[in-house]
């Protein structure tokens, strides 16, 4: 992780250039499945839209099926990235309602 920290250019993936905002979301178990994820994502998307950011992306471990179901529900679609390894990249437009 330290080596990655000193190589931030690894975040510059050409296929994601059209989705300039990047997000992470991780709720503690007691807070999952209660609508907080949707509310947090809504606040983020609203803020990005207000700031003029057109699209956002995230990278997730491809085997995380529950997270994928959540992102699918919120309108994210898969973004094709070459040599993505165990990661799936998803993105969406901020003009969709939060
Ligand atoms: C993934 C995560 C952010 C989702 O947040 P959450 O608060 O649990 O999700 P919400 O309760 O807000 O659900 C939002 C919508 O997604 C749907 N959804 C959420 N998890 C789902 C699942 N496992 N399967 C099917 N649908 C799911 C809900 O039904 C809900 O639909 P609705 O609002 O249209 O009724 C949260 O569970 C989490 O932090 N998980 C552990 C860490 C993790 O995997 N983070 C992602 C790393 S890439």
Image: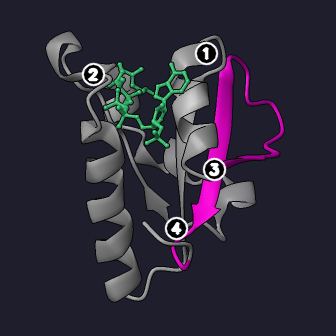
Disc 1: which residue: 65
Q: Is mark 3 within 8 Å of ligand 1?
A: no
Disc 2: which residue: 32
Q: Is mark 2 within 8 Å of ligand 1?
A: yes
Find numbered disc 3 in the image and state the secondary structure of the residue it sits on: loop
Q: How crowded is mark 4: few (under 14 residues within 10 Å), some or many (20 or more)?
A: few
Image-based side of 33 in relation to 36, left or right? right
Image coords of residue 57 (percent x, y): 55, 53
Q: Quadrant of residue 5?
A: top left
Question: Marks 3 and 4: which is nearer the front?
Answer: 3
Image coords of residue 53 (percent x, y): 45, 80
Residue range (magenta): 76-95
Q: Does the residue labelled 4 lie within 8 Å of ligand 1?
A: no
Image-based side of 50 in relation to 31, left or right? right
Indicate which disc, 3 or 4, sits on the residue closer to the N terminus. 4
Disc 3: which residue: 76
Image-based side of 32 in relation to 21, left or right? left
Image coords of residue 54 (percent x, y): 54, 79
Q: Residues within 10 Å of mark 1 (few under 14, many from 20)?
A: few
Disc 4: which residue: 20
Q: How far apart are marks 1 and 4 (CA)?
A: 25 Å
Q: Does the residue labelled 1 lie within 8 Å of ligand 1?
A: yes
Q: How far apart are marks 3 and 4 (CA)?
A: 15 Å
The answer to whether any part of residue 51 appears in the image is no
Image coords of residue 9 (percent x, y): 49, 49
Q: How far apart are marks 2 and 4 (CA)?
A: 27 Å
State yes or no: residue 94 in magenta: yes
Q: Which of 77 and 18 is in front in this view?
A: 77
State yes or no: residue 7 in magenta: no
């Amino acid at each position: 992780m330290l080596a990655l920290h000193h190589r931030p250019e690894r975040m510059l993936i050409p296929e994601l250039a059209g989705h300039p905002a990047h997000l992470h979301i991780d709720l503690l178990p007691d807070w999952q499945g209660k609508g907080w994820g949707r509310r947090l994502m809504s606040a983020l998307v609203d803020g990005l839209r207000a700031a003029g950011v057109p699209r956002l992306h995230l990278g997730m471990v491809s085997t995380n099926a529950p997270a994928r179901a959540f992102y699918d529900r919120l309108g994210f679609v898969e973004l094709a990235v070459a040599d993505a390894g165990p990661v799936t990249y998803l993105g969406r437009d901020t003009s969709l309602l939060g």
